[in-house]
Image (cartoon, rainbow, N blue to C red):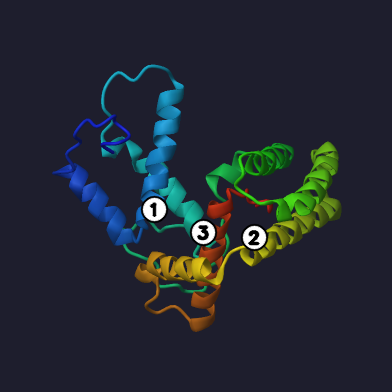
């Protein structure tokens, strides 16, 4: 918060401390909280000149939104909002639709994915070994974008399944491009992120959540978009 406020001291005391403590009680990983704060500041700065330092309280909605997205990404469903981590039950692990997905059309999603893939390659986030795959994925997405808005029923479901396949292929190549030592570090970080949720989780559910958490870290490392939709 101090860095985001250009070094201005931000005290996390009283109600603000209770707010952050509640995030910890819900199992919000530290990096997820930081991502929520970043999201608030991106919106804040986009409105023009900053008038006053931002308190941590103002970031709550964005932190919880990113937390729900993280939970969904690792297969834990949405946060209950009750202030306690999930027990990993089957009901809680049901997929949910994030606010971002609800508010984004499929054509818009495809356009954003193509732009982010192009940006990742132009910015050097991915190596030359990704070029062929990114070209092929981008080409498929361009074709899909032209007809996505008019797809219904089985045709739409077939496209969504194809997006899931492309997403998995992109992640497989990304994992293969990383040294074993880096993947080990990511694996350890994924276990730390899931620490608040491990108790009571079935071994297979926990294994899937850990694998998904590593995928999220790999995606973040290469700045890769989520190709799958919904």
**Residue bearing mark 2:** 174
Task: Name the residue rendered at 60%, 47% in the picture.
Answer: 125
Secondary structure at numbered mark 1: helix
The quadrant in which the N terminus is found is top left
- Nearer the observer, 129 or 220: 129
- The residue at which mark 1 appears reads as 31
Residue 33: image location, x then y, percent: 37, 49
Cα distance, mark 3 to mark 2? 11 Å
Badge 3 or badge 2: first in the primary sequence: 2
The answer to whether 164 appears left or right of 216 in the picture is: right
Q: Residue at x 48, y 81 (%)?
A: 202
Dot 1 or dot 3, earlier in sequence: 1
First of labels 2, 1 by sequence position = 1
Q: Are marks 2 and 1 in contact (CB under 8 Å)?
A: no
**Cα distance in 3D space between marks 1 and 3:** 11 Å
1 and 3 marks in contact (CB < 8 Å): no
Q: Residue at x 41, y 44 (%)?
A: 36
Percent position of residue 144, x then y: 82, 44
Crowd tier of the residue under label 1, counting other residues whose Cα lies within 10 Å: few below 14, some 14–19, many 20 or above: few
The relative height of residue 225 versus residue 173 in the rendered view (above or below) is: above
Kindly state the secondary structure of the residue where label 2 is placed. helix
Kindly identify which residue carries mark 3: 217
């Amino acid at each position: 918060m101090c860095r985001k406020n250009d070094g201005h001291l931000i005290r996390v005391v009283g109600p603000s401390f209770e707010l952050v403590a509640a995030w910890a009680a819900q199992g919000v990983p530290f990096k997820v909280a930081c991502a929520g704060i970043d999201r608030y500041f991106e919106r804040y700065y986009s409105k023009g000149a900053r008038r006053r330092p931002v308190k941590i309280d103002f970031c709550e909605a964005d932190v919880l939104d990113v937390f729900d997205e993280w939970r969904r990404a690792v297969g834990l469903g949405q946060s209950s909002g009750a202030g306690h981590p999930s027990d990993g039950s089957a009901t809680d692990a049901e997929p949910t639709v994030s606010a971002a997905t609800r508010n984004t059309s499929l054509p818009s999603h495809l356009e954003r994915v193509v732009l982010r893939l192009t940006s990742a390659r132009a910015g050097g986030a991915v190596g030359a070994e990704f070029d062929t795959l990114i070209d092929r994925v981008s080409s498929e997405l361009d074709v899909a974008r032209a007809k996505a808005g008019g797809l219904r029923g089985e045709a739409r479901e077939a496209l969504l399944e194809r997006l899931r396949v492309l997403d998995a292929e992109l992640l497989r190549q990304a994992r293969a491009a990383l040294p074993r030592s880096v993947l080990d570090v990511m694996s350890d970080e994924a276990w730390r992120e899931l620490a608040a949720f491990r108790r009571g989780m079935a071994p297979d559910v926990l294994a899937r959540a850990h694998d998904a958490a590593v995928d999220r870290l790999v995606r973040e490392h290469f700045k890769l978009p989520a190709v799958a939709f919904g």
